[in-house]
Amino acid sequence: MKITSKGQVTIPLTMRRKHGLLPRREVEFVDQPNGVLVVKAGKLSRGKRVLAVLLRGGKVKATRQAGCV
């Protein structure tokens, strides 16, 4: 599959159906050491987000959750 001059690719229909990537569904791109991971927006756990950021040398913002002291 080739990337267009606009940076677009087509996700095969069978994969879109299998993973629920419907029209107008938001996705996130997670930088990995050996490529890019495409996930449905909001479906990546906080732990996996932290790991992804750390693997690419970034900083993680701390957030407080309800009930935490």
Image (spheres, rainbow, N blue to C red):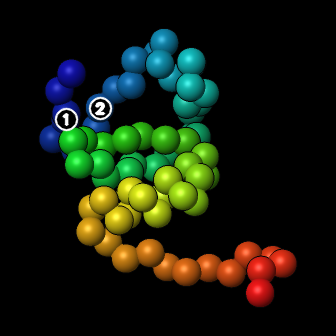
Q: Is residue 45 left or right of residue 10?
A: right
Question: Few, some or many C-alpha atoms within 10 Å of disc 1 (few <14, some 14-19, many ≥20)?
Answer: few
Q: Secondary structure at mark 2?
A: loop
Residue 6's quadrant in the figure? top left
Q: Residue at x 73, y 76 (%)?
A: 65
Identify the image quadrant of the N terminus.
Answer: top left
Q: Amino acid at mark 1?
A: Thr
Q: Is the Cβ of the residue at disc 2 closer than 8 Å to that at disc 1?
A: yes
Residue 49 vertical position relative to residue 57 in the rendered view, above or below: above
Residue 64 vertical position relative to residue 40 in the rendered view, above or below: below
**Identity of the residue furthest to the bottom in this view:** 69
The disc placed on residue 9 is 2
Q: Is residue 26 visible?
A: no
Identify the image quadrant of the C terminus.
Answer: bottom right
Name the foreground residue: 20 vs 48: 48
Q: Residue at x 81, y 77 (%)?
A: 66
Q: Residue at x 30, y 43 (%)?
A: 36
Name the foreground residue: 38 vs 25: 38
| Residue 29 at x, y percent in the picture | 39, 49
Q: Is residue 40 left or right of residue 69?
A: left
Q: Earlier in the sequence, mark 2 or mark 1?
A: 1
The disc placed on residue 4 is 1
Q: Is residue 69 left or right of residue 26?
A: right
Name the foreground residue: 4 vs 29: 29
Name the foreground residue: 34 vs 25: 34
| Residue 28 at x, y percent in the picture | 46, 49
Q: Secondary structure at mark 1?
A: loop
Q: Is residue 32 visible?
A: yes
| Residue 24 at x, y percent in the picture | 57, 40
**Identity of the residue furthest to the front in this view:** 69
Q: Amino acid at mark 2?
A: Val
